[in-house]
Amino acid sequence: MRSSPFHRVGIAADHGGYELKEYLLSELLREASAEVIDFGNSQFVADDDYPDFITPLATAVASGEVVRGIAICGSGVGASVCANKIAGVRSALINDSFSAHQGVEDDDMNIICLGGRVVGHALAWEWVQAFLQAQFSGQARHRRRLEKVAQLENRWSPTRTFPHPKPEESPRKPEPVRAVALERWENEGGEIPGQPHLPHPAERHLRSPNDGNSITPNPPRNADVPVGPPLQRLPGSGG
């Protein structure tokens, strides 16, 4: 790797990226131009959780403790999702050499995310080198776009309420149509705003509070209900 301008690089991985992290760590430590901080996991634990390691790494990048970071999980997706929750982090899942350096040059990417189960060690090392050697271009159009991204971070700051409900505050399961229609009938005296004075279409069996008569979808066949002529057998039909 050509001489890198970065003297402090962070790396972190869960069980899915542990093997790749150890390989990249050994390669990075051979480079005298970079000081590497390992944010864990320091050993393979099959059921560990990537936020426990990616979050400290991302926080260190955002604060300037390290200049760039390498985040690894099984696919790289979870690592990217987690890292980008930290304001000031610009991370992306990388699967090619071009994006590894272009993400820095145009978007000032400061954390590269890799999938330990989907990329070979040698190829991942190639992408990491491209990432660490790249420099942000600083062009006006790129700065303008990054400023808009920063405005999004300010708008959705941690002090704002997250739009999704908490598990214990999940919306109540919708009531069956019959219960909803019955409540509407009772509260509105059989009237549905903007509709004729008729029972709810889905509730033909509801009892009218006005006359006490039962309304059924299929009234019994009796003398009051006209009955058509019997069906005639067609010529040549069997049976």
Image (spheres, helix red, strand yellow):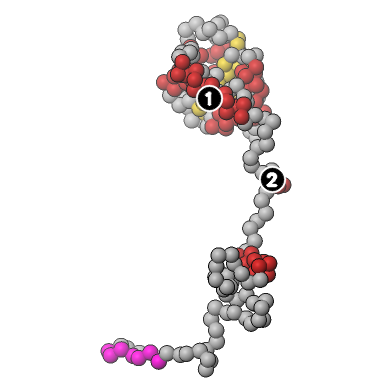
Q: Main secondary structure of the magenta part?
A: loop
Does the stretch in magenta take in 233?
A: yes
Q: Residue at x 33, y 90 (%)?
A: 233
**Whether residue 21 is visible:** no
What quarter of the picture does the C terminus occupy?
bottom left
The quadrant in which residue 197 appears is bottom right
| In the image, residue 126 above or below residue 239 | above
Single out the mark in the foreground, 1 or 2.
1
Comparing 119 with 54, the one in front is 54
Mark found first going from the N terminus, 1 or 2: 1
Q: Residues within 10 Å of mark 1 (few under 14, many from 20)?
A: few
| In the image, residue 93 above or below residue 127 | below
Secondary structure of residue under mark 2: helix
Alpha carbon distance from label 1 to label 2: 32 Å
**Residue 40 locus on image (x, y percent):** 65, 22
Magenta residues (range): 229-236
